Every structure is written in structure tokens, then in C-alpha cells.
Image (cartoon, coloured by chain):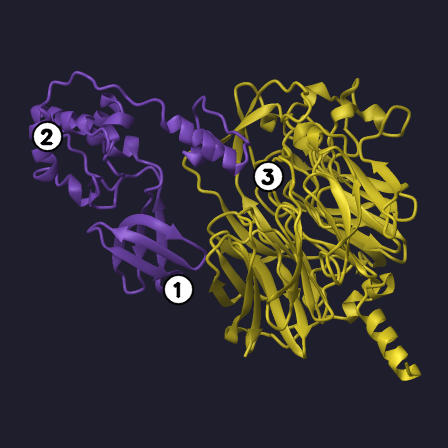
């Protein structure tokens, strides 16, 4: 949110603000008290959706709910309060269209031809750190890599368009919408 | 007391001071670092070579000093006679023992809530005779006793409530202290001041936006000159032979609305040459007339002498925020060369007189206009360096654009006076590079890429080294000749400052402000 307030949102009406960092944090704290998405009436069953999240969808390999899960994707503990149902649906059907900020997909090529794909954790002039697609933390000096390919706008998440039936999709969305944060 | 004893006291007393003549001869005392940029020429180059290409891989931390504040730490230390003098944000000063890194004294000043665009920062102090000088965020200039840090005098330079602020290190010249001002994002009228070092009395003021009846006022439509900006917030250079000060000026105000201030808007975005005794303007060169993209010329001119196109000349070298590298004759202001060193789209080119040919499509508009560089610039206040050994001008370049949407810009004292909102470019990751330019042609000889746009300055040394840093905390050394990477240390905090080097008890050190610490490095 800090970055959004400071830089605005590209190609939208949200402008940048030249506030000092302390004031940006204050605004962010205030904004966090606002704008919680109201629960919508959804066809799906959140209990069945929870089962799909943990089972067939294997969502917890990459996402966290209430402190449990992986770090390849955003924390979903309060995703229902932050995101609308249409957004959740788009994220499941076309993940690249809703690729979240701060989760840049990288392909790293080693001199011996190995290709490692993962989400960027950190990067500086001399090193890169990622979570690979198995969720393992990996750290490389650039001198150990032959090539680094950045894939902005691309998500490591698969589309669930074919994998889930419409009913299953609605159940999963109902579960995600029910995630309103830790009381 | 014996004559010998008295002499010893006198010699010691004199030695522990910084007379003007000592600053003039700074390059012959590489053990010290006597001005913001090291010498009046602002080369940020040292003849020290004990740390060199063969041993820089053994560079280790000698000591660290942690500051109290959590603001950006932009200081460039002074070093002489066994002591380092730093400013701490927002407006404090600390003297540090070079042997141990332990503080000797600190001057602490609480400042009111000053409106500032870019952080509660301070970039350093100046020394002259037995005094240190600091400009404060609330626009005071203060003289401190060199030995105790106690206040000798304190004068108000301008009213902080109208968003005047001071963030730069002063420059001490002869018997005066030169200080600039910030606040163009808030509609100030810029100036450069000189104060008597002994009394604090103002000696002269040069208004960088001329008033009615003064030459240059005709370049401002209506009363727009009253809030015309043109600040002077980074330390300039000085030529003792010509007795000329060289100082960069910043953007006109409002930053992005040119329609409210028709004309070239002198002396915004200029390099100005002023008589150091009187503050009279000798010449000016305007890099970006009628700027609507906030491409301040608050960068540091480097002064060298060289044969240029077959003629020996005194030159001023200038890596400008607008993306072009310039060479001027510093005695006359004559334009000699401009060469692009980073991505820019605001100009279609530079004509034979040095005047840019603007690209109107990049001017902020209601619909939004995208421009390179963004308002952080292709360069900025951070220090470049020039090595007479390699003949290269080292410049950290920022590769970053943005889109600007016009907004209204009413002048309200103490409030921002911009005229546009900024949005980052979608799907484009900004980056940066340390670039080595042939000083006399501007041709890029090599570059060392950085994953994000840098804010660190550059130091070059006779050890064949270039030191700089990235925003992720790496402090590194490169081969000054070809840019080959030689050494680095992850300091753990972003580096917003320029390195220096000095020698103490016969051993060379390099120091830089990193994160919230001053770190001194030496070779075992």
C-alpha cells in the first residue's frame, strides 16, 4: 500500500502522492481501516470449498491462510475482505490477468543448463533469492547464473478453468470470500 | 613557558584548523577530506593509492558509527587532523575519533515540522578555520566550535513555514560560507547566500529568480517569478584563480505547469557562475529552459583543465538530470558539448548553442503524458566523480520513466506547488547503471548495471578504483579503467550517500554512510 500511495496505480485514476514516508504510513494505516469488501451472496458452499482448497486445488502449497501454507503467492487470510467475487473468479480462471504485485516470476538458467523457475524474494546487484515452484528458498550469486529472465505479469498459478467444474469453482470462491481475517 | 613550548602550542593550534589556503590545496593533502566533494573542483577523486586493485579484495570494516535517527542518511563526511565530522539527519553534527569510531561530541538540534518534498535529510558540513558550519532543515545556518560542537552563531536564512529548507552541505570560501536553499516544490523564490564566517552576517544574496527590473525577469510571465523556484540545494564548486562559484539551480515552479509561467524562466535549471566576493552573476547556462518535467540542475559541476578541440581550456563537466552530459567553458559559459548518457524522451536533441529541442508530446497533459526520465531524473544530486588517471567521468544513471497528469497548482504558502500527479509505468521495472564517460567526448566507455536506479555517489582513486553502491545495501569497488567488479560488502541498508577516502596514521580508509551507519573500511 505504501508503494501504491507513493507511486499511484499505473493506467488508473489513482495518482502518486508526494507525502513524506511517515505520512504515507499514516494514510496507509487509515486506509486499512476502510474499504472492507462486503460479503456477497454466492452460489457455492464454503465448506466444500475449504476441502477443495486443501485437496484437489492444492492451494495451500503456494498460499497461506491463518499462518499455514506456502509463500509463492499472496497470503489469503483476509482475501475475502480485500477482494471482490469477480476479482477472485478472474484470479482462478485467468491468473495472468490478476498477477499480484510483489510476486515476480523468474526463470534462472545455470551454466550447466539447469532451469529453475520461482518467485522473486529479493534481488540486488550481486545476488538473487527466490522461492522455487516447490516452495523451497533458493539463493544465488549472479556469478553462478548464466541468465536471468523476468516474467512480469505472468503468474506461476495454473488456471482452474479446466481443472474445476463450475460448481467446484463456486465452492472455492465461496470459501475464499469467507476468509475475513483473524478475529 | 619556553619559546619551544609556545611554538608547539601555536603550531598545534594552527594545524588543527582549516584556513582557506588549506582548502585551496586540498588535493595535495589526500589524507584529509576538506569539502563536501573533497576539493573545490568537486572531483571526488583522491591521489591515495594504498588501497588499490591488487588488495581491494581484502577490504574489511574498520569501525561503524550508528546514528540516532531513521531518516535517509545522506552525509558526506569531512576528515582532518584525526577526526571525522558528519551531519546526522535532520540537522545534527557529530565528531568521530578516526582511530576508534567513537563519538567525541554531538550537536543536537530539534527542528519543527518543516514541509519538505524528499525527506528530513542533511548532506554534510563545511569547515573553515576553527569552525564547522551546518545548514538546518528549518533554514538556519549555524557555526559550531570545531573542538566542542558548541554554537558560535545561529542565523535564520529563510522562513521554514513557507517551506524553505536547507539540506545541502555549505561551502566555505575565503572568509565566507556559501549556502543554498530548497523548496521549489512549495513555490519558494530561490537564492544563493554568502555569510561572513566570523559573524554570521549576510554578505550577499543572489536571487536565482530575478525580480522586476533585473535582467532575466522578462523570462517570467506576469507575477509568476514570485514563486519561481530555482533552488540551490546541492553544494557547488569554486575556482580560486577565477574567484568564481559554480552552482546548479533547480526547477521552476510550479514544477509541471508551464502555462502559468510562460518564458524561459531564468535562472531555473542553470549552471550559474558568481563572483565569490560580491555574488554578482558572471554568466549562466540554462540546460532546460521552461522546464515542465522537473529536471533540476541541482547536480555537481566538476572543474577540470584540459585541451579541448586543440585549445587549452578551463572546463565545467556536468551530468544533468535531463539525461545529457555537458561540457562548458567555465570562464565564459560557452557551450561546448552535450551528449546523451541515459534514456530520455523529453528532447528531440540539443542544438548547436546547447538549447534543447523539446518534444511537446512528453509535457504533462490532462490525458497523461509519459516521459523519460521521470522527475527523479537520469542523474540527481548524488555525486559524480572524475579521475585524471583515466580521463573518465563516472556517473550513476537512472533508467526510469513515468506518466504525468496535469492538475491545478494554486499557490498556498507551505503547500505543494506541483501541477501534476505522477504514475509509475505499468510492467516496466526501472533499473540503473554506473557509467564511465569519456570526459571530453561524453562517449560511454563502459557501464556496470544495477537492478534498481541508484542514489549513491561515486568516489574514484589513484589506486585505479571506483567505489559506489546500490539501493539494496551493496558497497562495491570496480576497476576504474574497465568497470570490472573487484569487491563488495552487503552493508544491510540502502546507500543514499557518496563515499570518501582518507588516511590516518599512515593507513588509507574508505568511508560511506550506509543504512543508519557510517562505515569505515581498511585493508589489514
Q: Are marks 3 and 2 in contact (CB under 8 Å)?
A: no
User: Residue B97 appears in which quarter of the rendering?
Assistant: bottom right
Residue of label 1: A143
In whole angstroms, how far apart are the C-alphas of marks 3 and 2? 48 Å
**Is B368 above or below relative to B129?**
above
Subunit of label 3: B
Q: Residue A49: which numbered mark, if any?
A: 2
* Disc 2, SS: helix
Residue at horizontal 43%, vertical 54%? A124
The crowding category of the residue bearing disc 2, from other C-alpha atoms within 10 Å (few below 14, some 14 to 19, many at least 20), is many
Residue of label 3: B118
Q: Are marks 1 and 3 in contact (CB under 8 Å)?
A: no
* Disc 1, SS: helix
Of residue A131 and residue B494, the one placed in the foreground of this image is B494
Image quadrant in which the N terminus of chain B is located: bottom right
Subunit of label 1: A
Q: Are marks 2 and 1 in contact (CB under 8 Å)?
A: no
Which is more N-terminal, label 1 or label 2?
A: 2
Return the x and y of residue B284 as percentages of the image width and height.
Answer: 83, 40
Image quadrant in which the C terminus of chain B is located: bottom right
User: Residue B94 appears in which quarter of the rendering?
Assistant: bottom right
Q: Which tint is chain A? A: purple
Return the x and y of residue A111 as percentages of the image width and height.
Answer: 32, 64
In whole angstroms, how far apart are the C-alphas of marks 2 and 1? 45 Å
Amino acid at each position: 500500500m505504501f508503494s501504491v500511495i507513493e507511486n499511484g496505480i499505473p493506467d488508473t485514476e489513482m495518482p502518486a502522492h508526494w507525502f513524506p514516508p511517515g505520512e504515507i504510513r499514516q494514510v496507509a494505516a487509515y486506509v486499512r481501516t476502510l474499504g472492507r469488501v462486503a460479503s456477497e451472496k454466492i452460489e457455492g458452499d464454503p465448506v466444500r470449498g475449504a476441502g477443495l482448497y486443501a485437496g484437489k486445488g492444492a492451494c495451500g502449497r503456494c498460499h497461506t491462510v491463518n499462518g499455514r501454507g506456502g509463500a509463492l503467492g499472496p497470503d489469503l487470510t483476509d482475501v475475502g475482505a480485500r477482494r471482490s467475487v469477480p476479482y477472485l473468479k478472474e484470479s482462478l480462471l485467468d491468473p495472468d490477468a490478476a498477477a499480484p504485485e510483489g510476486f515476480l516470476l523468474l526463470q534462472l538458467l545455470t551454466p550447466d543448463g539447469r532451469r529453475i523457475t520461482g518467485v522473486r524474494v529479493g534481488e540486488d546487484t550481486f545476488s538473487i533469492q527466490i522461492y522455487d515452484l516447490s516452495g523451497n528458498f533458493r539463493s544465488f550469486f549472479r556469478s553462478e547464473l548464466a541468465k536471468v529472465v523476468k516474467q512480469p505479469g505472468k503468474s506461476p498459478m495454473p488456471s482452474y478453468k479446466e481443472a474445476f467444474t463450475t460448481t467446484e469453482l463456486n465452492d472455492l470462491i465461496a470459501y475464499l470470500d469467507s476468509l475475513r481475517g483473524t478475529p | 613557558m619556553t619559546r619551544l613550548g609556545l611554538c608547539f602550542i601555536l603550531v598545534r593550534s594552527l594545524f588543527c584548523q582549516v584556513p582557506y589556503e588549506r582548502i585551496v590545496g586540498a588535493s595535495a593533502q589526500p589524507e584529509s577530506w576538506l569539502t563536501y566533494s573533497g576539493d573545490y573542483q568537486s572531483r571526488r577523486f583522491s591521489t591515495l593509492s594504498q588501497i588499490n586493485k591488487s588488495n581491494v579484495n581484502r577490504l574489511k570494516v574498520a569501525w561503524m558509527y550508528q546514528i540516532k535517527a531513521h531518516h535517509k542518511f545522506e552525509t558526506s563526511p569531512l576528515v582532518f587532523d584525526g577526526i571525522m565530522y558528519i551531519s546526522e539527519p535532520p540537522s545534527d553534527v557529530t565528531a568521530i575519533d578516526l582511530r576508534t569510531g567513537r563519538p567525541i561530541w554531538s550537536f543536537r538540534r530539534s527542528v519543527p515540522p518543516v514541509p519538505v518534498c524528499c525527506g528530513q535529510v542533511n548532506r554534510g558540513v563545511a569547515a573553515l578555520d576553527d569552525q564547522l558550519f551546518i545548514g538546518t532543515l528549518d533554514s538556519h545556518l549555524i557555526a559550531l566550535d570545531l573542538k566542542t560542537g558548541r554554537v558560535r552563531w545561529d542565523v535564520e536564512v529563510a522562513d521554514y513555514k513557507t517551506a524553505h529548507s536547507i539540506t545541502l552541505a555549505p561551502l566555505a570560501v575565503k572568509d565566507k560560507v556559501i549556502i543554498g536553499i530548497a523548496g521549489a516544490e512549495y513555490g519558494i523564490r530561490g537564492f544563493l547566500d554568502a555569510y561572513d564566517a566570523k559573524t554570521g552576517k549576510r554578505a550577499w544574496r543572489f536571487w536565482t529568480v530575478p525580480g522586476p527590473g533585473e535582467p532575466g525577469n522578462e523570462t517570467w510571465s506576469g507575477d509568476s517569478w514570485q514563486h519561481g523556484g530555482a533552488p540551490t540545494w546541492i553544494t557547488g564548486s569554486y575556482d580560486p584563480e577565477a574567484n568564481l562559484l559554480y552552482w546548479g539551480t533547480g526547477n521552476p515552479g510550479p514544477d509541471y505547469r508551464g502555462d502559468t509561467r510562460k518564458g524561459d524562466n531564468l535562472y531555473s535549471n542553470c549552471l550559474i557562475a558568481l563572483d565569490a566576493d560580491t555574488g554578482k552573476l558572471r554568466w549562466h547556462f540554462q540546460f532546460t529552459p521552461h522546464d515542465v518535467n522537473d529536471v533540476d540542475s541541482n547536480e555537481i559541476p566538476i572543474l577540470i583543465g584540459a585541451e579541448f578541440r586543440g585549445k587549452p581550456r578551463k572546463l565545467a563537466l556536468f551530468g544533468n538530470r535531463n539525461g545529457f552530459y555537458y561540457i562548458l567553458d567555465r570562464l565564459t559559459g560557452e557551450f561546448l558539448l552535450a551528449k546523451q548518457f541515459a534514456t530520455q524522451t523529453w528532447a528531440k536533441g540539443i542544438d548547436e548553442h546547447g538549447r534543447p529541442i523539446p518534444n511537446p508530446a512528453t509535457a504533462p497533459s490532462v490525458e497523461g503524458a509519459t516521459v523519460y526520465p521521470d522527475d527523479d531524473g537520469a542523474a540527481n544530486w548524488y555525486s559524480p566523480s572524475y579521475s585524471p588517471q583515466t580521463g573518465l567521468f563516472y556517473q550513476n544513471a537512472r533508467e526510469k520513466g513515468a506518466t504525468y497528469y496535469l492538475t491545478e497548482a494554486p499557490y498556498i504558502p507551505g503547500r505543494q506547488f506541483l501541477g501534476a500527479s505522477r504514475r509509475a509505468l505499468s510492467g516496466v521495472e526501472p533499473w540503473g547503471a554506473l557509467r564511465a564517460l569519456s570526459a571530453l567526448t561524453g562517449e560511454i566507455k563502459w557501464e556496470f548495471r544495477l537492478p534498481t536506479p541508484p542514489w549513491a555517489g561515486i568516489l574514484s582513486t589513484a589506486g585505479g578504483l571506483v567505489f559506489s553502491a546500490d539501493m539494496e545495501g551493496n558497497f562495491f569497488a570496480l576497476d576504474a579503467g574497465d568497470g570490472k567488479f573487484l569487491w563488495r560488502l552487503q552493508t544491510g541498508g540502502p546507500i543514499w550517500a557518496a563515499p570518501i577516502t582518507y588516511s590516518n596514521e599512515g593507513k588509507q580508509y574508505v568511508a560511506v554512510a550506509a543504512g543508519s551507519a557510517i562505515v569505515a573500511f581498511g585493508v589489514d
